Image: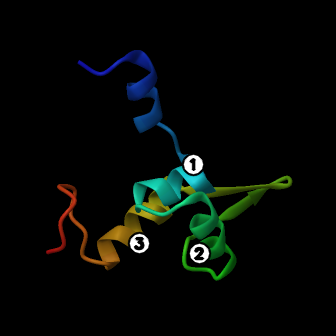
Amino acid sequence: MPSRHESKRDDRLVYDVPEAGALLGLSRNASYEAAKRGQLPTIKVGKLLKVPKAALMRLLEQAGITKGGTAS
């Protein structure tokens, strides 16, 4: 059974750049490099870079990644 913290994470609308990168198997540095190159969709909130969950999911769908974690 997921903990309260885990279920809250699933409801989030944005991720930090390293968190989004980790979901893609990227290191912290590689995540920021991908964001800098425009390969990882980001929005700026004040001075912070965030990755919208919806944009990340669209990116994965375009790449053919399914919910189970495999390419279709």
- The residue depicted at 31 percent of the width and 78 percent of the height is 63
Image x and y of residue 54, in percent: 46, 58
| Colouring chosen for the image of the structure | rainbow
* Number of the front mark, 3 or 2: 2
Which residue has dot 3 on it? 59
Crowd tier of the residue under label 3, counting other residues whose Cα lies within 10 Å: few below 14, some 14–19, many 20 or above: some
Distance between the alpha carbons at the discs numbered 3 and 2? 13 Å
Image x and y of residue 57, in percent: 39, 62
Identified by mark 1, the residue type is Val
Q: Nearer the viewer, residue 35 or 41?
A: 35
Identified by mark 2, the residue type is Ala
Image x and y of residue 4, in percent: 41, 17
- The residue depicted at 59 percent of the width and 75 percent of the height is 34
Which residue has dot 1 on it? 14
Disc with the residue nearer the chain's start (3 vs 2): 2
Crowd tier of the residue under label 2, counting other residues whose Cα lies within 10 Å: few below 14, some 14–19, many 20 or above: some
Q: Are marks 1 and 3 in contact (CB under 8 Å)?
A: no
Up the image or down, 2 lies above or below 18; here it is above
Q: Are marks 3 and 2 in contact (CB under 8 Å)?
A: no
Distance between the alpha carbons at the discs numbered 1 and 2? 17 Å
Identified by mark 3, the residue type is Leu
Helix, strand or loop at mark 2: helix
The quadrant of the picture occupied by the N terminus is top left
Q: How many marks?
A: 3
Which residue has dot 2 on it? 34
- The residue depicted at 53 percent of the width and 49 percent of the height is 19
Crowd tier of the residue under label 1, counting other residues whose Cα lies within 10 Å: few below 14, some 14–19, many 20 or above: some
Helix, strand or loop at mark 1: strand
Helix, strand or loop at mark 3: helix
The quadrant of the picture occupied by the C terminus is bottom left
